[in-house]
Amino acid sequence: MDPKGSNIPARMSTTPPPSSTAGTSPLGVLRWVLGIGAVLMLVKFVAWLLTDSTAILTDALESIVNVIAAGFALRSLQLALLPRDENHPYGHGKIEFFSAGLEGLLILAAAVGIIIKALRDLWEPQPLGALELGTALVLAAGMVNGVLGFWLLRKGRLSGSLILKANGQHLLTDLLSSIGLVAGLVALQLTGWRWLDPVVALVMAGVIGRTGIQLILQAYSGLMDESDYSELELVVHAVATARREAWVDVHNLRVQRYGSHRHLDAHITLPYFYTLDQVHREVEAFEGVCRQVLGPDTEVFLHTDPCRPIGCSHCRMANCAVRTEPYKQDYPWVLDTVMPNRQHGGPLAQS
C-alpha cells in the first residue's frame, strides 16, 4: 500500500505520464508524420488531377492510408504509453499490435482498389496530361516519405515501439513504390505506350499489398503472444552464462510483449534449505540478468521451486550437506529444456 493509503500498488500508479511535445519523443514524431503526411497527400492528388494517371492515383490513395494510419497510430501510442492500472495490470501496450494490424488492412484495401482501377484502364487506356510536372511532384513527395520512414524506423528501434516501426516500414515502401512509379512514367513519356500506366499501377499494388499482409501477420503474432525465439535465445544464453551455483535449473520460461514493454516469467529451482532472504537475493540476481538482455523496464515474475534429489547430479553447490549423489555435469540450458514446464532431471544430455 502506498503512503497515501491507496489500495493500488505504487508500481501500478494511475498517474498519466507527462505529455511530451518534443519532436524527438515517439508522440512528437507521429505528430510530425501526421502533419507532413497530410501535406504530401494533397501534393499527390494535385499530381493526379493534373495528369489523370492511374499510377499516380495509386500513390495518392496510399497517401490517404498513410494519414489515417498515422492518426490512429498517434492515438494508439497515447494509450500504449499510459501506465498500468487496475483494469489493465499489464499495461496498454497491445494496442500497438492492433494499430499495426489496422494499418495493414487499410494498405491491403487500397491495393485491391488500385488493382480494380488499373485493370479497367488496361482494357480502356485513358488520355494523360502534364506528366512531367506530375512525375516531379510524385518524386518529391516520395523522397520526403523516405526521409520520414528512416526517421520512424530509427525512433522505433530506439524505443521498441511497433507503431513507429510499422509506420516507418510503410513510408519506406511508399518511397520504393514512388521510385517505381516515376520510372514507369518516364518510360511512358519516352515510348508513348499508354498501357504502361495501368501496368505500373498493378505492380505498385502488388508491392504495397505485400507490405499490408506483412503488417497483418506481425500484428497477429503479437496479439496471439507468439514466441520470439531469437529473443528467447538471447535470454537463455545470458542466464546460462551467468549461472550461479544455487540456480539448479530454470524452466517454464516465457516472454510476452505488450507494445514496447516486455513481461518475463519463469520457474527457478533453488536449494530447498535456503532462507527466504537467500532466495530473494538469488531471484534478484536472475532478474538483473534478464533485464540486461530485454531492457531495464522488463517486468520479471519468478516462481521458485525447491530442489529435489533427482537434480543433485547437475547441481553446482560445492558444499551441500544433503546431496544424494555427486555433481557430474550441468544440465544443458537451451530452449528445449527451459521452455517446458518441468524441472530438470533424469539422464543428462550427452555433451
Image (cartoon, rainbow, N blue to C red):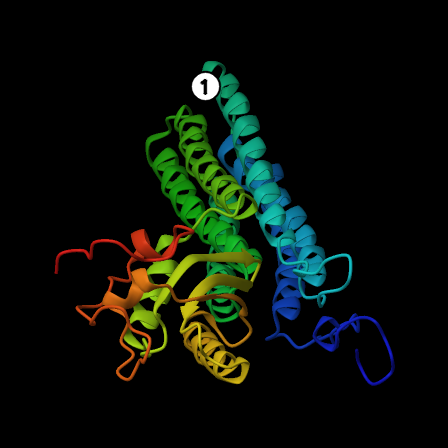
The type of residue carrying mark 1 is: Leu
- Residue 215 vs residue 286, the one in the foreground: 286
Q: Give me the residue at 25% from left, 54% from top.
A: 346
Specify few, some or many for label 1: CA neighbours under 10 Å numbering under 14, 14-19, or 20 or more. Answer: some
Q: Is residue 51 visible?
A: no
- Residue 93 vs residue 191, the one in the foreground: 93
Q: Give me the residue at 67% from left, 66% from top.
A: 81
Q: Quadrant of residue 243?
A: bottom left
Indicate the position of residue 271 as horizontal and vertical percent values: 40, 74
Q: Give me the residue at 39% from left, 28% from top.
A: 196
Q: Dividing the image into 4 quarters, which one contains the C terminus?
A: bottom left
Q: Is residue 340 left or right of residue 223?
A: left
Task: Reply above or below: 234 against 178.
Answer: below
Q: Is residue 224 visible?
A: yes
The count of marks equals 1
Indicate the position of residue 25 as horizontal and vertical percent values: 62, 73
Task: Reply above or below: 52 against 318.
Answer: above
Q: Which residue is mark 1?
A: 122
Task: Reply above or below: 183 against 333.
Answer: above
Q: Dividing the image into 4 quarters, which one contains the N terminus?
A: bottom right
Indicate the position of residue 178 as horizontal and vertical percent values: 45, 46
Residue extending farthest to the left is: 351
Residue extending farthest to the right is: 5
Q: Give me the residue at 42% from left, 32% from top.
A: 206
- Residue 280 vs residue 194, the one in the foreground: 280
Element assignment for label 1: helix
Q: Is residue 15 left or right of residue 336?
A: right
Q: Is residue 209 left or right of residue 12?
A: left
